[in-house]
Image (cartoon, rainbow, N blue to C red):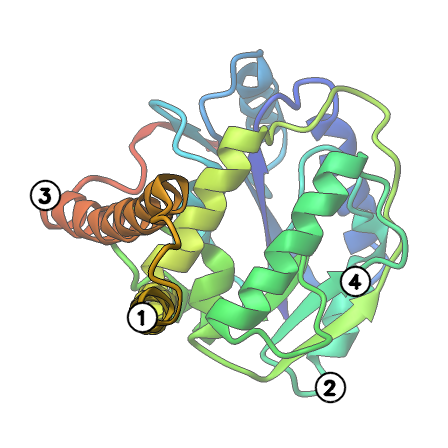
Amino acid sequence: MKISVVIPCYGSERTIENVVNEVMTTMKQRDVDYEIILVNDSSPDNVWEVISRLAEEHDKITGINFAKNFGQHSALMAGYRACTGEFVLSLDDDGQTPADELFSLVDKLEEGYDVVYATYDNKKHSGFRNLGSKVNDFMCEKLLGKPKGLMVSSYFIARKFIIDEVCRYKNPYCYVLGLVLRTTNNIGGVPVNHRAREIGHSGYTIKKLLGLWMNGFTAFSIKPLRLATMLGVVFAMLGFFYTIYIVINHFCNPLTPIGWSSTIAAIMVVGGLILCVLGMIGEYLGRVYISINDAPQYVIKELKKKE
């Protein structure tokens, strides 16, 4: 058995070496072959220098350096395309995901699952990140068909054929969870402990989280467009019935003044809805346009591996 460990790196100059050491120590518990692929997503700190040193010291480590920041999921895709193991494990670079429990995921996968996610009873993220996770979980369930009750995270393991299928996706708007969910529904979960962050802070801002959600839900689901259609039908019916009410009210109460405020309010609501729907359609068309122009998922500037 060979396990490939893929770790996207951003702002983890002070943590990535500890994570790598923990992975290597854990791997020694069993007779398995492994490799560690570290992908620097153009981090503003000196994490690439740390990765380069680790790659020169250990033949199990491969370092990939991006030319610019493409995001965590693009970094995962680059790592997946470089890995050679039968099982592929994705892990965070901040030490919050317990690398010493990786064999819990491996054992669960060997029960027959295609993909196994680590689940947390109590995440040690900030309130903002926990709220974002709950929103993401709800939207994945409704828009991407995630099995109800399944908790997903950035810490998971998959069989190589799943990763090979994921890597067939060539468009710039990659969202790994969406790619996994459209590949298999044979997904399991295993509880692990989530650690508190000791150094640094999360690289995900509100802007990045919104961009990530937009990637997932416009690249792998047309349900937002269907929802827009349904809203249009509902508002059209409300307008039709309101028109009937106005006509009847006019004949029953001819002295009732026509309300300009309600008219302007109705125009603003319907106008806002129209602009929202047009914006959603434009988002889809824009992504199609950028994909047609072959915008890259990532650009590798440098690759480091011990000779």
**Residue type indicated by callout 4:** Thr
What residue does disc 3 label? 293
Q: Nearer the viewer, residue 41 or 6?
A: 41
Q: Residue 251 — which label?
A: 1
**Residue at point 67%, 62% (across, down):** 152
In the displayed structure, does residue 51 sit left or right of residue 269? right
Q: Quadrant for residue 111, please give it.
A: bottom right
Q: Nearer the viewer, residue 55 or 135?
A: 135
Crowd rating for badge 3 (residues with CA inside 10 Å; few <14, some 14–19, many 20+):
few
Q: Are marks 1 and 3 in contact (CB under 8 Å)?
A: no
Circle 1: element type: helix
Crowd rating for badge 4 (residues with CA inside 10 Å; few <14, some 14–19, many 20+):
many
**Residue type indicated by callout 3:** Asn
Q: Nearer the viewer, residue 230 or 136?
A: 230
Point out residue 173 in the picture as x, y percentages from the top left corner.
33, 48
What residue does disc 4 label? 119
Point out residue 121 in the picture as x, y percentages from the top left corner.
89, 59
Marks 1, 2: nearer the viewer: 1
What residue does disc 2 label? 111
In the displayed structure, does residue 15 sit left or right of residue 35? right
Marks 2 and 3, how far apart at CA: 43 Å
Circle 3: element type: loop
Q: Residue 264 — which label?
A: none
In the displayed structure, does residue 210 sit left or right of residue 197? left
**Residue type indicated by callout 1:** Phe
Marks 3 and 4, how far apart at CA: 38 Å
* Mark 1 vs 4, N-terminal side: 4
**Residue at point 68%, 50% (across, down):** 133
Please tell me whether residue 73 is drawn above or below residue 38 in the rendered image: below
* Mark 2 vs 3, N-terminal side: 2
**Residue at point 23%, 49% (across, down):** 278
